[in-house]
Image (cartoon, grey):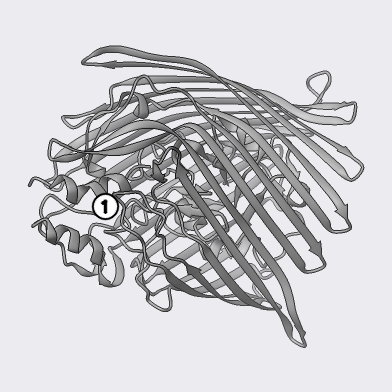
């Protein structure tokens, strides 16, 4: 079937482009993704850590959906299985997803239909970072860094020789059934770890028709067939399983270890099929990964700690068309090395310097392969420094990164060779007791990716014909954020305002042309501006005889515009405001949260506005007095108003709404 250019222009453009700790109190939360491992309360840049019971109850089918409720964070939502985090409206190559401090080494940044190969069921802690330290993980990570901590390679001896956890959970809106388990042991000088999981979901359940009214009217006006499927989102089911093992040699002051993990998933891609009622495109994805890690103290003169990590990756995914034919196969072999050393204090400054190397070989094979084979090599040198001076704390960061790309296509060989310089600086002023003001400034340069440079062909999974530009230049961003923090007893306040000014912002633009029955998008550059804020306030309401009642308020907003009359940046989240009431009593916790998502009218020319909605959720959890309160039961009700909720930041917002009313129930035993 031939799709009309105007009817699919919307689809083409859409395909372009609580900061919470668990209520199970943790005495000390360590943020591992920072250059200098720090306690959360000592971190200068805006940072969120999700862990404990809050993480267990809030886990979704992907890391993007798990984090989507955090202030300042949204997701790309290409169905529940393929959802990548967005921070302040930025994602893709501008945001790094890490697993235990190293990149996920998958292809999720290339396209929104590609899942992240980091399984949230196996997470112990998830860290969301912004500010100067994020630039040390790669060129142009102006969006931020998400680090999923699995502790697969043991770093310390356990107090008890043997421990672990087992968990089962289900969700009615996804018809989900999932189970996960882990085992940790210390045998003398050796630490051992095993983990595994399995998840199955059915088509997402909704109240109403999957396609939005706007897209149905648009297709009908163009004389195109309309899919009227109701009650579910077709082709949104998934299966996923995997696990890993790790072992380490535990030293008096450090460790050296290895790990292995595997990730295997098969999921459908919602959206228009070739013909209504026909099976849609599916993705079959596999990844095998080997990790090496170590931390040693006192081995280098002038340095107190040496840290090193390495990962070797074998990744492949097949895009399977509705008739069962394989359209494109993506094969990616990658290696990443990272080493850093914390130096001894010099004139009051403490810091870390290091290097990072990544080599990625990517090949897309098939009649519909839209990328030429390419090899991308990145070598980065970085330095991060911090100095307290009375009520002030100074921070500075530097990263110099060289990128080379070799590509081969029918038109001949092509290449890219350039060096980027990233600079950042921060200042924290403790101007009064329990009050601080933090200013962060950064200059970030991002090299274009192989896709942005050399794409040339149909990408059926996202229903568009992609054309890269080998003459693209590095993208430059000047960023600033100002954060006010206050803590007074149980009262906490965080307010951040930010601005990003991009020169040569790279984005896929719809041309209005049709090629191979698909709308054409070209990767272009144009200056852009982003402005926004994030706010969070937590405060106690009452101390009751048998418990405590507290409240939490959040709000966030981002606005992005292309310069010179280029219009709005597409797919940005709207204004969001919300509130939560929480009750805690001994082993029992309960909360009721309401979040209002405003209409999103600031859209690109070929993008439909998104209606607002209210999300009403309830959470209940109880720790049974079994084995030192290690049996956790949780119950969560989501979208209790059963609203038609479409995520404005999603490529598929017109075809795949968020799940309707649902109940998640789970049981976790820790030993």
Image: 382 above or below 593: above
**Number of numbered markers:** 1
x 77%, y 52%: residue: 41
Give the quarter of the figure containing the C terminus: bottom right
Label 1 sits on residue: 268
Residue nearer the viewer, 578 or 402: 578
Picture residue at 67% right of the left edge, 74% below the top:
551
Residue 119 on image: x %, y %: 46, 49
Q: Is residue 311 above or below residue 125?
A: above
The percent coordinates of residue 413 (x first, y second) are: 30, 11
Residue 671 visible within the image: no
Residue 629 versus residue 127 in the image, above or below? below
Q: Residue furthest bottom?
A: 545
- Of 603 and 540, nearer the camera is 603
Q: Is residue 206 left or right of residue 191?
A: left
How packed mark 1 is, by other alpha carbons closer than 10 Å (few <14, some 14-19, many 20 or more), is many
Q: Element under label 1?
A: strand
Residue 250 lies, in percent from the top left, at 71, 35
Question: Given the current orientation, which residue lies at the most extreme front position?
Answer: 565
- Which image quadrant for residue 186? top right
Q: What residue occupies the far right of the structure in this picture?
A: 390
132 with respect to 141 (left or right): right
Q: Is residue 523 left or right of residue 352?
A: left
Seen at 38% across and 64% down, the residue is 177
At x 47%, y 59%, the residue is: 574
| Vertical placement of residue 388 versus 377, above or below | below
């Amino acid at each position: 079937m031939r799709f009309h250019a105007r009817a699919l222009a919307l689809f083409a453009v859409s395909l372009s482009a609580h900061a919470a700790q668990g209520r199970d109190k943790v005495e000390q939360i360590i943020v591992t993704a920072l250059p200098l491992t720090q306690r959360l309360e000592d971190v200068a840049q805006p940072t969120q850590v999700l862990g404990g019971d809050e993480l267990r109850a809030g886990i979704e089918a992907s890391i993007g959906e798990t984090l989507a409720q955090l202030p300042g964070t949204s997701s790309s939502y290409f169905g529940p299985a393929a959802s990548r985090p967005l921070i302040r409206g930025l994602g893709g190559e501008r945001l790094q997803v890490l697993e235990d401090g190293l990149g996920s080494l998958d292809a999720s940044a290339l396209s929104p239909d590609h899942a992240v190969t980091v399984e949230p069921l196996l997470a112990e802690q998830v860290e969301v970072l912004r500010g100067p330290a994020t630039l040390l993980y790669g060129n142009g990570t102006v969006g931020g860094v998400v680090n999923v901590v699995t502790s697969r390679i043991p770093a310390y001896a356990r107090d008890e020789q043997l421990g672990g956890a087992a968990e089962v959970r289900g969700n009615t809106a996804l018809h989900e059934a999932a189970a996960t388990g882990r085992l940790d042991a210390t045998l003398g000088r050796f630490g051992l770890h095993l983990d595994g999981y399995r998840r199955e979901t059915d088509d997402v359940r909704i109240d109403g028709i999957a396609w939005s009214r706007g897209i149905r009217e648009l297709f009908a006006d163009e004389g195109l067939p309309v899919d009227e499927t109701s009650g579910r989102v077709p082709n949104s089911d998934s299966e996923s399983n995997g696990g890993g093992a790790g072992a380490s040699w535990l030293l008096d002051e450090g460790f050296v270890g290895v790990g292995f993990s595997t990730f295997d998933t098969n999921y459908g891609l919602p959206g228009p099929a070739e013909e209504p009622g026909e099976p849609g495109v599916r993705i079959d994805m596999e990844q095998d990964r080997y990790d090496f890690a170590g931390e040693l103290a006192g081995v280098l003169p002038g340095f107190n700690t040496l840290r090193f990590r390495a990962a070797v990756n074998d990744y492949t995914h097949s895009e399977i068309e509705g008739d069962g034919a394989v359209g494109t196969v993506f094969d990616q072999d990658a290696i990443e090395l990272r080493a850093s050393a914390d130096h001894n204090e010099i004139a009051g400054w403490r810091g870390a310097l290091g290097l990072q190397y990544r080599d990625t070989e990517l090949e897309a094979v098939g009649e519909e392969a839209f990328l030429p084979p390419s090899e991308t090599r990145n070598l980065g040198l970085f330095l991060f420094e911090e100095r307290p001076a009375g009520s002030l704390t100074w921070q500075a960061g530097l990263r110099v990164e060289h990128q080379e790309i070799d590509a081969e296509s029918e038109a001949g060989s092509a290449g890219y060779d350039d060096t980027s310089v990233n600079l950042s600086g921060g200042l924290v002023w403790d101007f009064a007791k329990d009050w601080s003001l933090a200013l962060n400034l950064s200059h970030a340069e991002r090299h274009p990716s192989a896709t942005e440079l050399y794409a040339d062909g149909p990408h059926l999974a996202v229903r568009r014909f992609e054309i890269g530009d080998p003459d693209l230049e590095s993208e430059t961003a000047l960023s600033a954020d100002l954060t006010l923090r206050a803590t007074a007893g149980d009262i906490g306040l965080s307010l951040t305002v930010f601005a990003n000014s991009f020169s040569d912002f790279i984005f896929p633009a719809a041309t209005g042309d049709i090629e191979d029955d698909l709308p054409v998008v070209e990767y272009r550059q144009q200056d852009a501006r982003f402005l926004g804020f994030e706010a969070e306030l937590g405060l106690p309401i009452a101390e009751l005889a048998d418990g405590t009642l507290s409240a939490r308020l959040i709000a966030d907003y981002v606005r992005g515009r292309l310069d010179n009359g280029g219009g709005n940046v597409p797919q940005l989240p709207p204004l969001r405001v919300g509130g939560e009431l929480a009750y805690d009593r001994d082993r029992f916790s309960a909360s009721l949260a309401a979040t209002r998502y405003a209409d999103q009218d600031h859209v690109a020319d070929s993008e439909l506005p998104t209606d607002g909605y209210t999300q009403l959720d309830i959470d209940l959890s109880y720790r049974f007095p079994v084995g030192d309160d290690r049996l956790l039961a949780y119950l969560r009700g989501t979208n209790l108003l059963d609203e038609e909720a479409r995520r404005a930041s999603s490529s598929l917002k017109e075809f795949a709404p968020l799940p309707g009313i649902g109940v998640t129930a789970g049981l976790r035993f820790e030993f």
